[in-house]
Amino acid sequence: MTASAVWTAEIEATLGRLRLDVCLSGDLRPVALIGPNGAGKTTLLRILAGARSPLRGKIEIGDVTIFDSEDGTDLAPEHRRVGYVPQGFGLFPHLTALGNVAFGVAADRSSESQRQAAEMLRHVGAAELEARLPIRLSGGEKQRVALARALIADPAMLLLDEPLAAMDPIARRRLRAFLASHLAQVRRPTLVVTHDLRDVKALDAFVYVLEGGRISQSGSWDDVASKPTSDFVAEFFDVQDRELSPGCE
Amino acid sequence: MTASAVWTAEIEATLGRLRLDVCLSGDLRPVALIGPNGAGKTTLLRILAGARSPLRGKIEIGDVTIFDSEDGTDLAPEHRRVGYVPQGFGLFPHLTALGNVAFGVAADRSSESQRQAAEMLRHVGAAELEARLPIRLSGGEKQRVALARALIADPAMLLLDEPLAAMDPIARRRLRAFLASHLAQVRRPTLVVTHDLRDVKALDAFVYVLEGGRISQSGSWDDVASKPTSDFVAEFFDVQDRELSPGCE
Amino acid sequence: MKWARASVLSLGFLLLGLLVVPAMALLVAASPAELAQGVAHPLFGPSLWLSLRTTMLSLAIVVVCGTPLAWWLASAQGWPQRLADALVELPIVMPPAVVGIGLLETFGRSGLLGGPLELLGIQVAFATPAVILAQVTVSAPFYVQAAAAAFRRVDPDLLLVARTLGQSPVGAFARVAIPIAMPGLVSGGALAWARALGEFGATLLFAGSLPGTTQTMPLAIVLALESDVRAAIAISLVLAGAAVLLLLGLRLVAGLRPSDDATSRSKLS
Amino acid sequence: MKWARASVLSLGFLLLGLLVVPAMALLVAASPAELAQGVAHPLFGPSLWLSLRTTMLSLAIVVVCGTPLAWWLASAQGWPQRLADALVELPIVMPPAVVGIGLLETFGRSGLLGGPLELLGIQVAFATPAVILAQVTVSAPFYVQAAAAAFRRVDPDLLLVARTLGQSPVGAFARVAIPIAMPGLVSGGALAWARALGEFGATLLFAGSLPGTTQTMPLAIVLALESDVRAAIAISLVLAGAAVLLLLGLRLVAGLRPSDDATSRSKLS
Amino acid sequence: DSSERPLTVFAASSMTEVMQELALAFERERAGTRVRFNHAGSQVLRLQIERGAAADVFVSANREHAESLAGAGFADRVTPVAHNELVLVVPLENPAGLNTFADLVRADRIVIADPAVPAGQYTAALLSRAEEVMAESFGTRVLARVVSRENNVRLARAKVELGEADAAIIYRSDALSGARVRAIEIPLDVNVRAEYVAAVISDSSHHEQARAFVEFMLSVGGQAIFERHGFSAGVAS
Ligand SMILES: Nc1ncnc2c1ncn2[C@@H]1O[C@H](COP(=O)(O)OP(=O)(O)OP(=O)(O)O)[C@@H](O)[C@H]1O
Ligand SMILES: Nc1ncnc2c1ncn2[C@@H]1O[C@H](COP(=O)(O)OP(=O)(O)OP(=O)(O)O)[C@@H](O)[C@H]1O
Ligand SMILES: [Mg+2]
Ligand SMILES: [Mg+2]
C-alpha cells in the first residue's frame, strides 16, 4: 500500500490443511477483507487479535510491533489494543447488553462508563436492550451489542468479522453509515471482513481479496472491480463481462 | 393466501416483551419471512418446529394438524416432519460434516445413507469437508453443512432461518439456484427467513413481512415492493420513491 | 416410544430411590423422641459447631486454591495437565484412613514438613488445623474436577474478546471464565462441602478425636455408634436434614440467576 | 501483571501438592521390599479382585441409572428437580457408616425391603450384592451431579434439530445429549469409580467383612492397619498406583477425541 | 498454657463408657483436673503416639502395642489395669433360639472379630480350645457360619443389635453396655482372658497427673468402676 501505512501484517501460519501466507497493510482508510468461505479470513483476524501465534512474520500497529518472529516479540492480546468483533457475536452470556458494552471501559469511572456504554448502544440502535441478557436477544440484536462493545474501547485498531451479517437491511444501512462516520471521526485503522459489496462501498474501503490463504488481489474497490482476476472477485462485484484480467504474480 | 394452502399457521404467543400474533399460510411456492431484527422471525420458526407451544392457535402442514389449542393437539418435533436450519448453524459438534448430514437419514440403509449424505454435501459445495468436525469449519462452511442436513431428510416442510447469511457471494448465488431447483423438484413447502432481497427474488418467494410480532404486509415480492407500508419494506426492496401506501388494517 | 422414555427414566428414579431410601429408613425407624434426644446428646452441640466451622473454612480453601488449579487443568491437554488431572484423584482412591496416615507422615512431628513447622511453633497434627487439612485433602478433588469440567466448556473466543478489551489473563479468568462456569463451580462446591462434612477416616487418624478440638460430627456419630446406635442415627438424621436444607437453599439462590430457556428445554427432553 | 497470574496459579499448585503429598510421603517411607511384601500379603489378591469386580459393576449401575436421572435433573428447574438435586447428595453428607446402617434398615433382615426379599430367597446383607449396593449409594451422587452439570450445558437448539430430524426424546438424548456431554460424563464416572474403590464405612456396616465375599480392598487395608501398619500402607500404595494408572489411561483414551483448539486455549489462559 | 491443657488419655474404643466414668470419679477426687479422651483402635492410637500426638496416658486393649511403645521409649512402664472375657451375644428376639454356648452351631449368621485385632485373636484361641474341650469339629462348624469378621467388637455387637446376625462373640464389657443384646456365658474351661494395660507417655507434660490417673484406675474405687462395666477385677496392686 502507501508509504504512510499505519499498520502492516506479514503472516505465515498453518491451520489444519490451510496455509496462510499474506502481507497486508493499511492506513486510516478502512480495509475490507473479502474472500470465499474457508479462505482464512477469520483465522487472519484471530491471529491479529492474538489468539494464536503465526509461524513467521511481523505485525505492527502504529509504532508498536505486536509480533515479530525474528526477535520473539509476541504481545498478549490485552497489550495489542485491538477491538475484535468475532464472527458469531461472542457476547458474554452472564452480562446484560449494557454490561457487555461497558466491559472494556475502564472500571474506575463507573457511572461515566455506564453512560458511555448506554450512549454507544443508542448509536447502534439497541438502546432499549440495555438490561437484557444475550440469551434474550435475537441474532441481529446480539450483533449490534457486539459491535458497540468493540467500538467503545477506543482500540488502536478495529477487527470486525462480518459485523453486519445478521442485521436487517435498515440496520445494516444505518450502521454502515454510523461506522463510516465513526471511523472517520476516531481515525482508527480498521480491518473488516464482509461478504457484502455495499459494506465495501459505504465504507469506501481499500480491498484485499483472500483466496485459499493468499492475497489474490488488492486495491481500491473500483480498481479491483474493474480488473477481476478470479471468478470470486467478478461475482463479488457483479462484474457483467467476465473477461478476467491476469493476476499480479 | 390461496385456497390451495398446503400449510397454515395461526399463532398467538409471548416471549419476554414480544407478543407474537400471526396468521400465515402457504402452498408449494417458497415463502420468505422478512422483518427487522427482533421482530420474532426466529421465535416463529422455533414454534413451528416444536420448541415451544403457542398460547393459542392452530398449525397444519399438509393434512396433518401439528398443533391445535382447541383440542389439545401438540405433536412432538419428531412427528412434525419439518426440516429446521437454526440461525447460527446448530451443527452437532461430535459428528463430522458427513455424520451431521447423515444424521436424519434412516440408519438401516447405512452405506446408502452415507452416499446420499455425501451427494448432498456435494450439492451445497462442501464435498471436501466430509470428514471435518464442526470446530474445524469456517462460518460459511458450517452453514452449508446445516443446510444439507435439513434438505436431505425429506421433511414435509422446510424452515430455514437465514440459511445463507454467512456464505460468500458465489456460494450464495449457487445455493440460491440449487435451493430453488431443489424445492421445485421435491415440492415441499418452505418458509425461509432472510434479510437479502436477492434470496427472495431468486426463490420467487411469496413474502410475509413480520414487524413487532405482527404480519404487516404480505404478497408476491413485486406486490409488496410496489406498495410498501413501512420504512422497513421500502428499505428492503430499495424502493426509490418512499411514499408509503397505507397498511392493510 | 413413550414407554422407551418411561423405562429409561424409571431406571433413574430407581437410583434416586436407592440414594434416598437409607435416610428414609432411618427416619422411619427413629421416633421424634429419639431425634430430640439426639439433638440433646452431649456430643451434638460442640461437634456440630466444630463441623460447621471447619467445613466452611475447608470449602473456602478448596475454592480459593482449587479454582486456579482447575483453570490450569482445563487450559490445555498437555502431559503435565493430564498427569495432574489423574493425580488429583489420588485422595479419593485411597481409603480415607490411609490418607490420614499420609498426612501424619507429612505434617506429623516426625513427618516431612512436621519438623520445620514445629520449629516455627506450628503444630498441625491433632489440632483443629489437622481437621481442616484432612477435609481439604479428601474434598478438594471433587471440586477441582467439577470446576475443570466447567472451565473446559468456556468458549475460548470469549476469553479472546475479554483479553482484547484489556483484561489480563487473570482478569479474563475472573471476569469471564468464572462467571460463565459458575453453575459448575457451585455444584462442585456443594459436592466438596458435603464430602468434607461427612469426612471421617482421615480426620480420625490425622487429627484424632478430641471433643471440641478435633471431634467433628462424623467422629462423634461413629463414637456414639459404638455405644448407642439409636442416638448415633438420630444425630446423623439431624445432620443430614440440616445439610439438605442448606443445599436446597443454595440451589434456590443459584436458581435465581436466569439460565437457559427453561420451558423449551423441558419440552425437548 | 505476570506476578498476579503466577501468584494465583501458585495457590493452585499448593493445593495440588497437598493432594499428592500424603501418597508421596507414604511412598518415601515405604521401601521397595515393603511394597513387594504388600503385594504378596494374603489379604491383597482376593480383596483386589473383589474390589475390581464390584467397583466395575457398581460403576456400570451408576452410569446406566445415573445418566437418565441426571438428564431429568438437567431437563428443568422446577421444584421436583431442585428437591431431588439436593436429596441426591444425602449419601455424601451422612458418614458412610450411617449410610451403611440405613442400608441395613432397608435391605437387612428386619429392614423395610429385607423381609420381602428374604421371602424371595434373596439375602443381600453379608453378601457381595451388599458391597455393590453400598458402593452404588456412596458413589452415585458424584456421577449424577457431574452428568447433570454436563447436560445443562447442551444447547437446546441441538436437541430441537435432532428431534426435527426424527429422533424421539430418548433418541435425541442418546445420539446428541450424551455424546456432547461425554467429557463431563467420563470425568464424573472417574470420580464415582474412584469413590467406590475407596469406599469403606458403608460396606463395613452393611456388607460386613469376609475375605473373598465382602472384604474389599479398603476393608482389607484398614484391617491390616490394625495389625501391621507397614503392610497396610504398602497395599494402599499399590492400590493407589494402579488406580492412577487406570485413570491416566482413561484420560489418554478420552483425550484422543479432538476437542477445542488446544493451542489457542492455552495461549489465552 | 500447658497447665490448662486437660489430661489427655488415648484409650481403646471398647472402653468408651468405663473411661468416662473413671474420669468423672478422678476429676471429683482431684479438684481442678480435667480429663479428655481420644478413642480409636489400639493400633491407631499407637500409631498416633509414635507420630507425635500429645497424649499423656495410653490405655490399650492389647499388651503388645503398649510394650512396643515402651520399648521405643515413647512410654513408661506398662501396667495391667483390667481384664475382660468373651461372651456370646444374641439379639433380644433371639431368632436362632440360642441358650448356651454349645447352641452356637445352630446359628445361621455368626459375626466375630477378625484375627487382625486383639479380640479376634482371643476368639480364635477360644474356638480352637472349644475344638478340644467340646464336640469334635465345633470350631470348624462355627467358622463355617461366620458371615463377617469385624474390625472391632462394637461393630460385631452392632450387627447383633440391628438383628442382622444371630450371634456374635464379643467382650463381656461390651455386652453389658449394649442395651439391645442378651449375653450368654461361655464356659470357663473354654474361655480366654483379655488384658488391658495402661502406660504413661514419656514426654507427657502432665507426668504427675498421668501417673495419678493410672494409679486411680488400680485403686479400689477404680477397680469397682471397671467391674461395674463388666471387666474382671483382680489386678489391684
Ligand atoms: N481449528 C481448525 N483446525 C483446522 N482447520 C480449521 C480450523 N478452523 C478453521 N479451519 C479451516 O481453515 C480454513 C479457514 O477458516 P476460516 O474460518 O479462517 O475461514 P473464513 O475465511 O473466515 O471463512 P468464512 O467466510 O466461511 O467465515 C477453513 O478451510 C476451515 O475449514
Ligand atoms: N428467551 C427469550 N426471552 C425473552 N425474550 C426473548 C427471548 N429470545 C428472544 N427474545 C426477544 O424476542 C424478540 C424476537 O426475537 P427473535 O429471535 O424471534 O427475532 P428475529 O426476528 O429472529 O430477529 P433477527 O433478525 O435479529 O434474528 C426479540 O426482541 C428478542 O430480544
Ligand atoms: Mg469467517
Ligand atoms: Mg432470528
Image: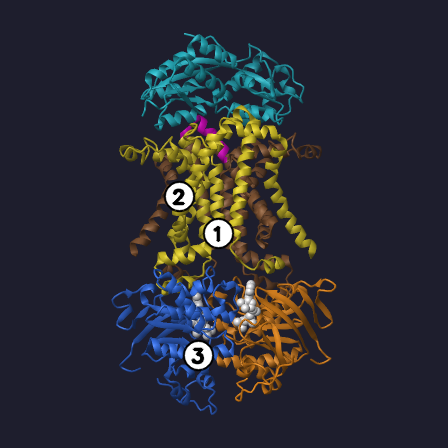
Chain colours: A blue, B orange, C yellow, D brown, E cyan
Kind of residue at disc 3: Arg
Check the residue under mark 1 and report the chain it is in. C
Q: Is mark 3 within 8 Å of ligand 2?
A: no
Check the residue under mark 3 and report the chain it is in. A
Q: Is residue C97 visible?
A: no
> Disc 2 marks which residue?
C61
Q: Is mark 1 within 8 Å of ligand 2?
A: no
Query: CA–CA distance between discs 1 and 2?
Result: 17 Å
Q: Give, as a single range, the part of the protein colored magenta.
A: D217-230
- The local secondary structure at tag 3 comes to helix
Dot label at residue C184? 1
Q: Position of residue C70 (x, y in %)?
A: 41, 51
Question: Looking at the figure, which quarter contains the N terminus of chain A?
Answer: bottom left
| Magenta stretch: includes residue D223 | yes
Q: Position of residue D109 (x, y in %)?
A: 65, 30
Q: Is residue A64 visible?
A: yes
Residues at marks 1 and 2 on the same chain: yes
Q: Which of the 4 quarters of the picture holds residue E168?
A: top right
- The local secondary structure at tag 1 comes to helix
Query: CA–CA distance between discs 2 and 3?
Result: 51 Å
Residues at marks 2 and 3 on the same chain: no
Q: Is residue A221 above or below residue C227?
A: below
> Disc 3 marks which residue?
A176
Left or right, E46 with respect to B26, comes to left
Kind of residue at disc 1: Gly
Kind of residue at disc 2: Ile
Q: Is residue B34 above or below residue D14?
A: below
Q: Nearer the viewer, mark 2 or mark 3?
A: 3
Q: Nearer the viewer, residue D193 or C47?
A: C47
Query: CA–CA distance between discs 3 and 1?
Result: 40 Å
Q: Residues within 10 Å of mark 2 (few under 14, many from 20)?
A: some
